[in-house]
Structures are given as structure tokens and as C-alpha cells.
Amino acid sequence: MRRRPERGFTLIELVLALSIVAIMVTMLFGGLRVGLRAWQRGEERAAVLQHARSLTQLLQEALAGTYAYRGRADEATPAEVLMFQGGADRLSFVTVSPPISLPAPIPFVAVTLSMDGGKAPGLAIREKALPNFNPFEAVAPSAVDPSITAIRFRYLRDEGAWEGAYRAPSRGGHAHRDDERARPAGASDHGADPGELAMKRHDQVRLGPGARLARNLGQSLRRLATDQSGFALLAVTLVLALLGVVVTELAFSMRLEAAMVRSYKDAILARHLAEAGIQQAIREVLSDSTIQGLDEEGQVVFYQVAQTGAKPKALPKLPRSHVQLGPGEFSYRITDEEGRLNLNAGQRGLLDKLLTTLGVDKQERDVVTDSLEDWKDANETHRINGAESDYYLQLPVPYRARDSALQDITELLQIKGITPELYYGHEDRPGLVDLVTARGRGTININTAPKIILQAAGLSDAEIDDVLQARAVSPYSAVPTRGAAAVGGRTRFSVSSTTFRIEAEGLIGGEPRARLLALVQRMVGPQSAVPTLTVYTWRPLPLRSPVKEGEAK
């Protein structure tokens, strides 16, 4: 068979082939460029949304930890006032969850949110440790977020109307709502972001068929002329590879964004579940109970005594562990604050005995007890081993002595001599955080107090054994004779409580995603049999081990 002679490309064929290749390359790179610009624009908007979402969550946590803190506004004003101020574009409050943690264990921090102008405009966050005079003064901002261009605060009145400025409520309590408008840094003021502006620019691809390029392409096209299917396969493979890279990156980005949104949604849902747990616990606290005790697992149980001398009858106990509600669960536990030692009750001797039981030596005990008394008294004269404002103002994070009763036991970390080890304890020794309180009537509930508190109260080991054995069978309906010793004109022991600590958590998929703490007091007035509830503390807790039904120290 005679072989067909090879023939080269004519100039027209070469120009036509090069034109087709140029058009294909231009279309390919143009489409890729548009896709990359769109992807970049989406990434920028996702970053803006994530930043706004993170900032909103940070401010929500700070506002959720708002505390009705009362203190002296300045040195010239002896009366304590509520530390809260609010306007349309400025909000000042006290929180236990500051947006930016201070480099010291400060439980209460004064936070001011406002828009700052000048060279670095944006949302400014200012913080100041408490106690202090002029807590909301214009100190240097701890952080400035230039991506926030405007922020507006509104305040919910008791009547349900939103107002642009805060006014002291007639019955106490208020709510906050904040609206933010964020934009990416460097965005255009004409309504277009960098991604939109970038998509309006197109680069031209210029291909000039020079002699060397024509010769090289001609040789390649001659080799592919006899196998056009190979050329098509190569082009299709190239296009599919590029599309695969773009689709993979897009899918990864969308999956990451979906995971962030799901995590944010779960956190909000878990917080509502934890709030539901606190509400159910409050329902138990407000029950028609007369005394409280502990069950075999260390949980507070509410009892009712029909008549004097009758055996206490336990009220129905609501489920407290893994209670199903909607797509999640909640758990909670209730502990008795009046089973602890009240540091505001003026029982210095009992605190000294408690510290002795914890193994604290005499020198450290004297520092702790004197410093605590100096923290609470109204003068600036320190005791021999104590400390007043002149000592605390010289610390790296300065603050003043409170010179008033404790509002929360977390203030103990600010007092001279109380170390984190003494406050939190360790495996072999409980800490003050589990043994003392700043709320309550000043008496100790003999039905719920742990052994170490009974020891500090002066009971002997034999008496403590009798109390623990007797209340394990049934709680006391009246204070036994051995516990009726008077301290400072008050009865030291009682069998009922009014103040309780509630710890609740919301679970999503069986995992705790939010924890809350509430300190509440139930009181019944002489004019009405309907109990009233006072909430002293309502704040988020860090995530740690889940709340177990039998957990008690």
C-alpha cells in the first residue's frame, strides 16, 4: 500500500487554528477569573459575617453576665448606686464576663461600649476593675474594632416598650438589645465592596502569532492532525481538572461555613435549654415546702411538714438529668446556699475555725480574716494583718477595697491572703468556693450543711455523726437542742433555707454546649402567702464536666 505523503499546514489553516486556540484559552481563563473573583467575594463576605457573628456573640456573653452591682460612684458620694448607664450610642455596665479578660482574677469589671472617632474610628471597648471610683470614666480603650461603623442601643421598659435611653426602672430589671452594622475594612463608601469592584475589571489576553510560536504550534498540530480524538480528550481533561479544583475549594468553603453556622446555632439553642433548666429548678424552689434536706445522692429535696411534730413528707421531685426538650436536653442541680458559712453574717470566729479545719496555718488565717474585715468595713484603716485601698491600688490591676458587704463570693479572689488554691481547693481539700456564701439569712441549715461546716460551727465529732445519721433517715423538722447555741443574738442553725444555687446546662447531641448559674432567694411576706423570688446572680459558666445528678461535695 502506498503511504500518503505528509502535507504541512497552509497559512490560512495555521491562522484559523491559532484563532480557535486563542478563543478557547481566553474563554477558559476568563471563566476561571470570574469564578475566582466570585469565590474571593464570597470569602470576603463570609469573613465579614463571621466577624460580626463573633463580635455579637462576645457582646451577648458580656451582657448575659451583667450584674446589678452597687457601689460608690465617687469619693464624695457615700451612698451606693446601681452601676449602669445607657444611651443611644453608649452603654456602660458591670459584668462578670468581660469581653477582654483582665490579667488578674477580677470578678466584676466595668465595661463601656461606644463609638470612637479620630484617627482610628470604630467600636471602642473600655474596661476597669471594680471596686473603683468613676468606673465609667473615659480611660484608654482596651480594644477598638474599626470594622464596626455604627452601633445603636435600645432599652426595654417594664411596660414592654423599647426606648433609646436608659431610665431607672420602677421595679428593677432591664433588658438590652444591640444592633450592629459591620462592613469589611477598606470597603468602598459607594456601596460596593472590593469583590464587586474587582469583578468590574477585566484583563485582556493578547496572543500574537509570532514566527517561533507559529512553528512550534504547527509542529504540535501536525502531530495531532492524524488523531483528533486525542486533542479533544486533552482539552476535556484540562477543563475537568480546573473545574474539579474550583468545585473542591467551593465545597470545602461551604462546608466550613455551614459548620460555623451550625455551631453558632447550637450554642444559642443550648443556652435556651440551660435557661429552661433554671426555670424548672425555680419551679421547685417556689414549691410549697417548709424544710429542705438532701437525698442519698446529695441533691436538695424539698419537704413539707403538715403539723408540728409530724414526719416531713418529700414533695414530688422533677427530673433533673437529661430532660428532653425539643432537639436537645437540659440538666440542672440545686444546692443550698444556707448550708454554707455566710461571710456577711459577722461570724469571724466561724471563719477562723473553718480555715483551721482546712489546714491553714495561723499566720495565713490572721491575714485572711483581717483582710476580709477590712474589705467589708466602711473605713480606710487597715488591721494589723489586713489591707485597705492603699494596698490594692498598688497592684498591677488597681482597684479599691469595697468597704461594704460582699455581693458575691468571687470577690474573695481580690482579697489579700486568699490564693486561688485556697479559693478553688484541690482533690484532697475543698475550697472556699464550695463552703462559703455572701447571701442568705446568716443561719446554717443543719439538714444540708456538709461535715466540714458542722465542724466549723463547733459541733463535736460525735454530734456530727449523730446529725449525719439522723438526717440520712429523715430531715430534722426542728433544730435539735445541741444546735441551738446563739451567736451574736442569732440562732446558729435552722432546718429550712431561702437561698439556693442553681447550675444548669444545655446539651446538644448529648454534649454540654452552654452552662448557666443562678443564685435565687425565695421569700414569703407576712401579708401574703404567695412566695416571691429574687434573682441575685444570673451568669454563664465555663464548659467543663457535665452536671451529674448525684454531684455534691
Image (cartoon, rainbow, N blue to C red):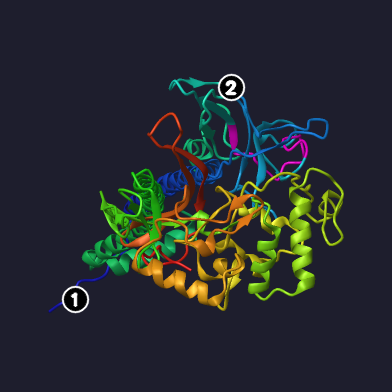
Q: Nearer the viewer, residue 255 or 290?
A: 290
Number of residue marks: 2
- Which quadrant would residue 363 be assigned to in this image? bottom right
Res. 481 visible in picture = yes
Q: Secondary structure at mark 1?
A: loop
Q: Nearer the viewer, residue 259 or 494?
A: 494
Region of the chain picked out in magenta, as a range:
133-149
Q: Nearer the viewer, residue 417 or 8?
A: 417
* Residue lying at 51% horizontally and 72% vertically, measured from the top left: 463
Q: Secondary structure at mark 2?
A: loop
166 left or right, relative to 474: right
Q: Is residue 447 above or below residue 84?
A: below
* Three-letter amino acid code of the residue under disc 1: Arg
Disc number lying in front (2 or 1): 2
Other residues around mark 1 within 10 Å, as few (<14) / some (14–19) / many (≥20): few
Residue 507: x %, y % from top left = 35, 57
Residue that mark 2 sits on: 165
* Three-letter amino acid code of the residue under disc 2: Ala
The numbered dot on residue 3 is: 1
Q: Which quarter of the rendering shows the N terminus?
A: bottom left
Would you say residue 493 sits in the magenta stretch?
no
Q: CA distance from mark 2 to mark 1?
A: 96 Å
Magenta stretch, overall SS: loop
Q: Nearer the viewer, residue 294 or 513?
A: 294
Residue 101: x %, y % from top left = 65, 53
Q: Is residue 223 above or below residue 413?
A: below
Res. 19 visible in picture = no
* Residue lying at 43% horizontally and 63% vertically, measured from the top left: 215
